[in-house]
Image: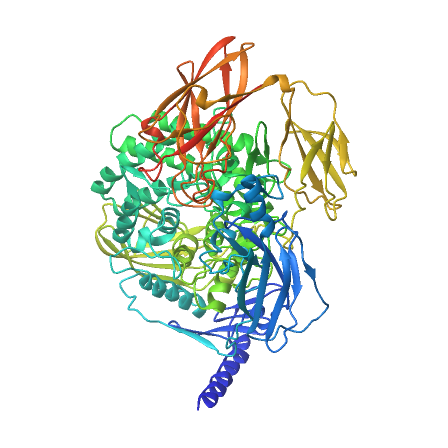
Amino acid sequence: MKSKIFVLISLLFAILCSCNKKSTNLLYKSSKFTFYSNSIVQDSSKAVALSTTQIMSNYISPAKKKYNRTIHFKFSINCKDNERASGKDNMMTLIPVNGESKTPLIKFGTQLVDTASMQSNLEPNTKWTVRLDMRDIFSSFREKGYYTLYNGDKLYKTDFKGVFIAGDAEPLSWDFENLKNKNLELKDPDGDGIYEISLTMNDSINNSEIKKWTIKHNIYQYPQISSGHLMIDALYNLGLDELKTNIEPDSTFRTGKEWAGVWTRDISYSILLSLAIVEPEISKKCLMRKVKNGKIIQDTGTGGAWPVSTDRVVWVLAAYEIYKVTNDQEWLNTIYPIIKNSLDADIETIFDQTTHLVKGESSFLDWRQQTYPNWMSSVDIYSSLNLGTNVVHARAYEIIAEISKLKGINGTKYQRIANDLKKGINQYLWLPDKGYYGQYLYGRLQKSLSPRSEGLGEALSILYNIIPDQQKETIINNIPVTPYGISCIYPQIPTVPPYHNNAIWPFVQAYWNWGAAKVHNYKALEKGLADFYRPAALFLTNKENFVAENGDYFGTQINSDRQLWSVAANLAMVYRVLAGMEFSPEGLTFAPVIPENYGRKLILKNLKFRETLLNIEIDGVGHTINRTLLDGKPINKAFIASSLKGKHILKIKLSNKIENKGKVNLVDNKFSMTTPVVHINGNELIWDKVANASKYIIYCQGIQIIKTSETAVKLNSIKTATEYQVKAVDINGMESFLSEPIYITDLNNNWFVEAEQFIPKSTLPYKGFSGSGFVELTKTENTSISLEFNSPDSGKYIIDFRYSNGSGPYNTENKCAIRSLLINNQYVCSVVFPQIGLDEWSNFGYSNHCEVPFVKGKNIITLKYLPFNENMNIDVNTAMLDGVRIRKL
């Protein structure tokens, strides 16, 4: 019976698809897919809108049709990528016997290459047993108390928590930080040092089922649309349907099918896109869920959240958007002190005094190796200056200045900071030769600009007027756009699996489309709308992300159906892009942008705005408005004032003229060069050859000094602190990241002051420190400590602190320790001690560095816990302090 039903459904689907091309108009066509009025076709895959409440799709992930029998994998201690250098994976071709395959005994750190040339898929349900020899590690633990990893780091016996396997084929994953959660830990039940795990590879699944979405919820309390394009109407309703599914019993929004709870940046970007319009009350409740002790919560991010990750201020933008939509004065009074407290703490902690930019991780791109070079630690990320994060900060300070004005408070201080941020973004992050912004400034003593584009930050810079109007279109014209959409970054990073890297996120695509509409670039908008609607139709859900290289949802490291900001983005394509809705305290403005092929009447009914219920009709194409009628009477502009009440009909007639369609920089999805790994040997810089590199560029203090095709250069005698870095470049000019800085100085200009010389040392049983011990810093112990340094000369010095923080993993949670640095009783800067690894208290590293003025002779170096040093955890703000490193500039 089931087979007969399947045949009938398949036949029906084939008939619908074959009729589709003849009966509906073309909206967009590319080399990868075609978007019709009621269907989307990609190779043999088709999605068809059967009605406004049903879509059918036969899409099957190509990755699920093919399962490569050669597995790439690595071992991982403590859920870190620490077996070998990036790209040097183990490789094994599985040739099962009686359904089973086994590895030879692999020694940790020794590469296994056991491959065969076989094109066939791996047999389903193959049992694969992996055996790992850890005896050398445990022998080193017994003899020395630690094991030296490939990169020279010491792993202490007390810090060993387990060994895991990562890889490129399900159920393996390259998501090192979450290997424990994925049940990928090897075990040694008999204690002989040989660890094992058995996995089922190519777990059989049914790939033949045609899938269909049918609406589940009553969505008629929300605005209803009729665009004249059945697929757009159906996908809009799919968005509303999934929005209702994401409402939890406690009247908050779930972040996605796989993501429970409310997350600060997710809910905030979603509110900005559309949730303030359709669900302002739930949006308010969600935002207030992300407030603690009167400040916004940075609930996730590298190294223990804030201040390594600093994009929590997108909350400010979302909260103000709700006010602009609702005109709720009580809400405005509620959010003002929260915004002020949060921004004031940021002023003390994350501002870079040289550039007037804010420090911290890329907004939403919070998985370190996905968008940063592998050498960058949490400390390096804290010190970096990112485009998207700075854009949302600039807008946040503008907003508090605007709210201050509404409340009759002097907000000029905040407007000045906003202006300085905009100036800094344009001065330090703009790439004049490319016509868009760079990704971030990064490095240590000297910062360099990464020339990668960053899709979200570029879009936000247009929407929030960071760049002058005449240059906004330049960004849309010049940013590299891949065949399936705007990728998070471009070019992609080699050897890093898709998630933020080599991926497209629908909500980022939505902000990009919004920006394209703002500058009236119709080519970019037509492509962007198609790039947004394609995955939603084929996958029958608003996915979290998909792979940039092939447009497939399968293959990213983590993915979720009905991801909240993707759902909100779906609705925004109508509200923000096609209808051009923009809210202000004074009212609601419509600035429609209708591409040529979309030119049927767009009807939007049941739109609630304050005390008004609106029906809107937009007739024509383009963006120039010829005539606007409110209840049949002409008005000067398409604007609904706050004072309007009751039911009204707004009709907008467009000119049907598009004089300049703009352009798109369509590129293949390319990868950059691998970052060189550089070391110093005597007076030579030496690095391994990078595959396909035609030359290497050597930088000194951030300035290019040498080009060479060799893999070594001799250095002159160095007497002052100097940093060197190397970049690989291929024949087409594709560059790598800069290598980890090599710091060289005269040893006579280096000092280390042990903390225990001045403060009683801790009795905790941790290892890895220098000298005779270390000092414990908590919120109650050693809240103010002072060390002394006798400087041979007055002048500028660089200092940083050797510390450990085992309060949490290095990639998440919220226990980054923070202290204020004072030199001779004068405040200098904040010092951050990010988490290094859960319970890895013997793993010592260095804090951010600070440039300080010393006088000749005695200087007092003070670390103090001040109120603005409160982290996101509030209760735990702990680090072990070994001492302070001092280097003369």
Relative to residue 613, is residue 856 drawn left or right?
Answer: right
Choose between 591 and 707: the one closer to the eye. Answer: 707
Q: Is residue 664 visible?
A: no
Residue 120, compared with residue 342, is above or below; it is: below
Relative to residue 741, is residue 308 drawn left or right?
Answer: left
Relative to residue 373, is residue 363 drawn left or right?
Answer: left
Q: Quadrant of residue 809?
A: top left
Q: Quadrant of residue 841?
A: top left
Give percent across and percent down for residue 857.
50, 8
Choose between 191 and 311: the one closer to the eye. Answer: 191
Residue 576, compared with residue 736, is above or below; it is: below
Quadrant of the frame with the N terminus: bottom left
Residue 335, compared with residue 779, is above or below; it is: below
Give percent across and percent down for residue 582.
37, 47
Give percent across and percent down for residue 556.
53, 59
Residue 741, compared with residue 618, is above or below; it is: above
Q: Quadrant of residue 332?
A: top left
Q: How many marks?
A: 0
Choose between 29 and 242: the one closer to the eye. Answer: 242
Choose between 710 and 348: the one closer to the eye. Answer: 710
